[in-house]
């Protein structure tokens, strides 16, 4: 079996100190269901410590009162080659998050930052394969934002249409397991029914060896995983998917994030990758 070599990552995360479900902007959020913030914080710290134990660097941004979704760092920036494309949120409740993250980047050695002019929920809807930037649209990020990302980074962007409101961000329906090499397009896992028929055909054509997720894998946010090319951090509930990844030589690393799930997010949503 292939020996999978882990690659060291740099992540930006935001502690859920003000996490709450006060409004519903995706089908997972129910303001009637109580949230245990202490538990959310403990689970979040577990995720952060897991990354550190795997040898990755985790930076932390200060959360802001009144921005309960700020913990979902992936939505606030896309960083490739040290260049940053910021966010522009669809929901007014989340809009101010973009500026807090912009300030973090400018204050931490990332002066090359572009703020988008179209709705753009960053890594929530963009996934870098090492060669292509896969880009989701349909619920949040606008297609024009895909073109904007292509101009900013000078990498080919491939638009994919999401059709199931439960999988409203690309990162709830697809993730990159290993990056492209000279003789491979990279390896991804995805849930076909989350995509339009045409987008499904594009994915099947580009990634014939992809891991195809089942309904159960997708419904527990199994596709909201984070891979370092070897270790795959994913929700503990995604046990069946974990087993299939192990068969391919990956090392699944389960994490418990049940409180943050109430906001409609999993491990990847809490993790913004800073790519040098
Ligand atoms: N409550 C947040 C929202 O609906 C959750 C964001 C999840 N983030 C993600 N990358 N999928 O915007």
Image: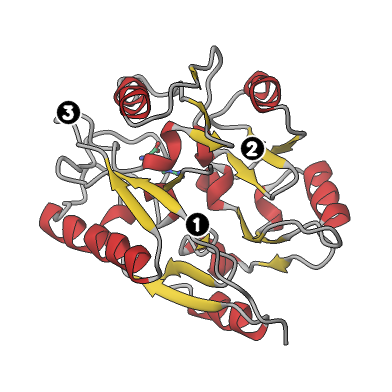
Q: Could you say which disc has been placed on residue 224 in the image? A: 1
Percent across and percent down for residue 59 are: 31, 46
Q: Nearer the viewer, residue 58 or 238?
A: 58
Mark 2 / mark 1, whichever is N-terminal: 2
Query: What residue is drawn where x is 48% and y is 79%?
Result: 239
Please say which color scheme the image uses.
secondary structure
Tell me the element at label 1.
loop
Query: What residue is drawn where x is 31% and y is 22%?
Result: 103
Give yes or no for contact between labels 1 and 3 (Cβ–Cβ under 8 Å). no
Crowding at dot 1, Cα within 10 Å, few <14 / some 14-19 / many 20+, comes out as many
Quadrant (top left/top right/bottom left/bottom right) for the N terminus: bottom right
Query: What residue is drawn where x is 15% and y is 44%?
Result: 17
Percent across and percent down for residue 86 are: 47, 25
Q: Could you say which disc has been placed on residue 136 in the image? A: 2
Measured along the vertical axis of the image, is residue 253 above or below residue 11? below
Q: CA distance from mark 2 to mark 1?
A: 14 Å
Percent across and percent down for residue 26 are: 42, 39
Q: Which image quarter: residue 134?
A: top right
Left or right of residue 109, residue 126 in this image: right
Tell me the element at label 3.
loop
Mark 2 / mark 3, whichever is N-terminal: 3
Image quadrant of ligand 1? top left
Q: Which residue position holds label 3? A: 66
Q: Which image quarter: residue 155?
A: top right
Residue 179 seen in the figure: yes
**Residue furthest to the front:** 109
Give yes or no for contact between labels 2 and 3 (Cβ–Cβ under 8 Å). no
Crowding at dot 2, Cα within 10 Å, few <14 / some 14-19 / many 20+, comes out as many
Disc 1 residue lies near ligand 1 with CB under 8 A: yes
Q: CA distance from mark 1 to mark 3?
A: 25 Å
Tell me the element at label 2.
strand
Query: What residue is drawn where x is 61% and y is 77%?
Result: 245
């Amino acid at each position: 079996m292939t020996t999978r070599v882990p690659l060291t990552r740099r992540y930006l995360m935001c502690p859920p100190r003000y996490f709450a479900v006060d409004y519903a902007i995706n089908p997972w959020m129910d303001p009637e269901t109580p949230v245990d913030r202490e538990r959310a914080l403990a689970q979040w710290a577990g995720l952060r410590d897991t990354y550190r134990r795997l040898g990755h660097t985790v930076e932390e941004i200060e959360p802001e009162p009144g921005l309960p979704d700020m913990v979902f760092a992936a939505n606030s920036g896309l960083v490739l080659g040290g260049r940053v494309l910021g966010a522009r949120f669809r929901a007014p409740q989340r809009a101010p998050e973009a500026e807090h993250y912009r300030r973090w980047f400018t204050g931490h050695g990332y002066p090359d930052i572009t703020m988008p002019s179209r709705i753009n929920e960053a890594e929530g809807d963009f996934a870098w394969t090492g060669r292509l930037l896969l880009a989701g649209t349909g619920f949040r990020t606008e297609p024009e934002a895909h073109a904007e990302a292509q101009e900013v980074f000078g990498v080919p962007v491939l638009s994919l249409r999401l059709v199931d409101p439960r999988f409203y961000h690309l990162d709830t329906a697809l993730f990159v397991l290993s990056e492209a090499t000279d003789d491979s397009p990279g390896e991804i896992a995805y849930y076909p029914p989350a995509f339009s028929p045409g987008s499904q055909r594009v994915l099947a054509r580009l990634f014939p060896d992809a891991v195809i997720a089942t309904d159960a894998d997708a419904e527990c946010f199994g596709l909201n995983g984070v891979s370092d090319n070897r270790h795959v951090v994913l929700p503990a509930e995604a046990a069946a998917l974990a087993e299939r990844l192990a068969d391919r030589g990956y090392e699944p690393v389960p994490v418990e994030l049940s409180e943050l799930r109430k906001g409609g997010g999993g491990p990847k949503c809490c993790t913004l990758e800073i790519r040098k």
